[in-house]
Amino acid sequence: MRTAVVTGGAGFIGSHVAERLIADGYRVIVVDDLSTGSEQRVPAEADFERLDIVEYERLRDLIISSSPEAIFHLGAQSMVTVSVSDPWRDSAVNVTGTLNVLQAGRGEQVPIVFTSTGGALYGNEAPLPTPETQLPAPVAPYGASKWAAEAYVQTWALADAVPHSVCRLGNVYGPRQSPHGEAGVVSIISHKLWSGEPPTLFGNGEATRDYLHVTDAVEAMVRAAGAGGVFNISAGREVPVREIFDLLSQESGVQVEPVLAPLREGELERSRMDPTRAAERLGWKAEISLERGVPETYRALVKEFETGD
Ligand SMILES: NC(=O)c1ccc[n+]([C@@H]2O[C@H](COP(=O)([O-])OP(=O)(O)OC[C@H]3O[C@@H](n4cnc5c(N)ncnc54)[C@H](O)[C@@H]3O)[C@@H](O)[C@H]2O)c1
């Protein structure tokens, strides 16, 4: 049976990647230290290894003994605020952890799909829509650690002639996203509305992001496995957070006025990535519109909130 390893598979996006690979007939091994993830999110059919990717030996032994066909590397310190308060841990997990994943798969020539970021990488001065050729200018340590990790991924790809891929994701939303993180806007606003509380819209509701449904993100990552290269994975649409609020407000039927607040430190005003390369090289484009994906996500999240998942 074909095997795939998913680091961060107890997290939001990783759990969807694991689910998809199982549906595709893979034996899936989820690697996660549960620092922000939850074992409940790991699909029942997957094998689960609780492991910190900063610890190289255990990771290497697992990769060598399981001979995976691909490694989907999503395990990360993914919070900008944490990267500011503890840049050492951010670097340890995102840079050393990625180096460990690359080294562990090296003898086996396993292609890796690394999940990077678009929003936190390109910075405030980038042209919109931003192409992959734009020189990164991250404003927070999280973007710097992802950029450094990308450099390792590309260097290892060149040195070993293995088609490792980098997926620079837009703002991913969907079922199983925690409302208690800092960036899951759809989930955070959904939870507030479900609780009958007014959500806060930063950038006075005008801050824009390039939103992407998790099912579309997973499809792109599956296509990127073994393709090699750096890809913007986004819908390529610039959407004000106010529009997300309006869609959720309509779906929930909850009438509350949002609190408008200025952007927080280190936050981007606008974001929109150019996904043309992914369309040309992976034959991929986002299929799920916000008008469909946001209300569907609200309904799924409400079930999770009600059961306390
Ligand atoms: N959600 C987004 O919109 C978005 C956008 C761009 C990039 N990304 C990237 O996609 C990936 C997944 O993001 P997510 O939103 O699902 O985040 P998440 O926090 O839900 O998932 C990350 C997972 O990694 C695990 N993890 C953290 N440190 C670890 C360690 N040292 N060893 C093993 N596991 C560890 C966590 O427990 C968690 O389950 C991350 O690499 C993130 O940086 C996400």
Image (tube, grey):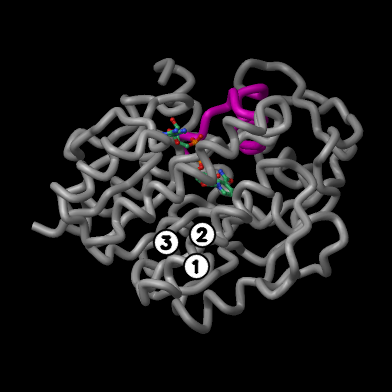
The label number, if any, that marks residue 221 in the structure image: 3
Q: Which residues are magenta?
A: 175-193
- Find residue 67 and report its horizontal and vertical position in percent: 16, 55
Is ligand 1 less than 8 Å from the beta carbon at label 1? no
Is ligand 1 less than 8 Å from the beta carbon at label 2? no
Along the line of sight, the residue nearer the viewer: 200 or 1: 1
Residue 176 on the magenta segment = yes
On the image, numbered disc 1 is attached to which residue? 155
The reply to whether discs 1 and 2 touch (Cβ–Cβ < 8 Å) is yes
Residue at image position (69%, 75%) is 133
- Find residue 69 and report its horizontal and vertical position in percent: 22, 62
On the image, numbered disc 2 is attached to which residue? 152
| Marks 1, 3: nearer the viewer | 1
How would you rate the neighbour count of disc 3 (Cα within 10 Å): few for under 14, some for 14-19, many for 20 or more?
Answer: many
Residue 106 sits above or below residue 134 on the image? above
- Find residue 41 and report its horizontal and vertical position in percent: 34, 31
Q: Amino acid at mark 3?
A: Met
- Find residue 5 and report its horizontal and vertical position in percent: 27, 49
Residue at image position (68%, 36%) is 80
Q: Amino acid at mark 1?
A: Thr
Is tag 2's residue or tag 3's residue first in the polypeptide sequence? 2
Along the line of sight, the residue nearer the viewer: 253 or 23: 23
Task: Calculate the distance from the C-alpha at mark 1 to the C-alpha at mark 3.
Answer: 20 Å
How would you rate the neighbour count of disc 1 (Cα within 10 Å): few for under 14, some for 14-19, many for 20 or more?
Answer: few
Tell me if residue 256 can be seen: yes
